[in-house]
Amino acid sequence: MTKENDNRQIEFEAAAFRRLVQHLRERHDVQNIDMMNLAGFCRNCLSNWYREAAEAAGVALSKDQSREIVYGMSYDDWKEKYQAEASGAQKAAFEQNRPKE
């Protein structure tokens, strides 16, 4: 693969990431616990991956800063506006499906 192709791939990946983040910002009706139960990741995971990538590149980024990038607002504001209490069924599914470390 040429350097030009590598650069194009990075551009495409960045565009896909931006679209995913925008989609998640618009779909605040989709709860993180549902995403975890169905897909094995949520907005918090995405913000952690973003922070890890920044740190790997030598850029300091706090957990709160990376979450704000993904949520489009502070995590506390998002929780207050959009996060619903998880049902017993959601919590049970999370315990069954949660990533094992």
Image (tube, rainbow, N blue to C red):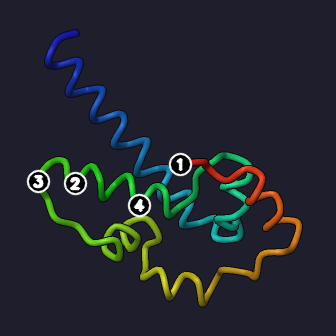
- Tell me the kind of residue under disc 2: Ala
Q: Amino acid at mark 3?
A: Gly
Residue at mark 4 = 47
Residue 21 vs residue 84: left or right?
A: left
Depth check, front residue: 86 or 101: 101
Q: Quadrant of residue 13?
A: top left
Q: Which mark is residue 67?
A: none
Give the spatial CA distance, label 4 vs label 1.
19 Å
Q: Quadrant of the N terminus?
A: top left
Where residue 41 sits in the image (x, y, percent)?
A: 58, 51
Front of the two marks 1 and 3: 1
Circle 1 sits on which residue? Answer: 101
Sequence order check: which comes first, mark 2 or mark 4?
4
Of pointers 1 and 2, the one earlier in the residue sequence: 2
The amino acid marked with disc number 4 is Ser
Find residue 54 and name its label.
Answer: 2
Residue at the disc numbered 3: 58
Seen at 39% across and 59% down, the residue is 48
